Image (spheres, rainbow, N blue to C red):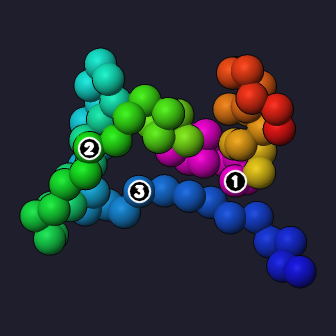
Amino acid sequence: MNMTARTYRLAPHIVFNEAEQGAVLLDTRGGKYWQINKTTVDVLRLLEDGNSVSEAATILASQSDVES
């Protein structure tokens, strides 16, 4: 098992624009865009803050009524 910590970052050519109900990600190279909801914004932030995927899932579950 690889125990190396991963760091997650959006690529430099991805523009992140937050809105009230979520955000839009724009790929300035390919011209594609994605609309994401508030939960997905929270996941991105947790991962960019250095949390592992497992840690992010635990944090999100603790903020809701979901068992981890």
Residue depicted at x 34% and y 41%: 36
Q: Amino acid at mark 2?
A: Gln
Q: Secondary structure at mark 2?
A: strand
Pick the front one: 16 or 38? 38
Residue 22 quadrant: top left
Residue 22 as seen in the image, left or right of residue 42: left
> From which residue to which does the magenta span run?
44-53
Residue 40 is situated, as x and y percent measured from the top left of the image, at 47, 40
Q: Are marks 1 and 3 in contact (CB under 8 Å)?
A: no
Closer to the chain start, of discs 1 and 2, is 2
Mark 2 vs mark 3: give the one in front: 2
Q: Main secondary structure of the magenta part?
A: helix
Residue farthest along the bottom direction in this orientation: 1
Q: CA distance from mark 2 to mark 3?
A: 15 Å
Q: What crowding class fits label 3: few (fewer than 14 Cα within 10 Å), some (14-19), or many (20 or more)?
A: few
Closer to the chain start, of discs 1 and 3, is 3
19 over 45 or under it: above or below: above
- Look at mark 3 in the image and give the residue it sits on: 10
Pick the front one: 3 or 39? 39
- Look at mark 1 in the image and give the residue it sits on: 53
Q: Amino acid at mark 1?
A: Val
- Look at mark 2 in the image and give the residue it sits on: 35
Q: What crowding class fits label 2: few (fewer than 14 Cα within 10 Å), some (14-19), or many (20 or more)?
A: some
Pick the front one: 42 or 16? 42
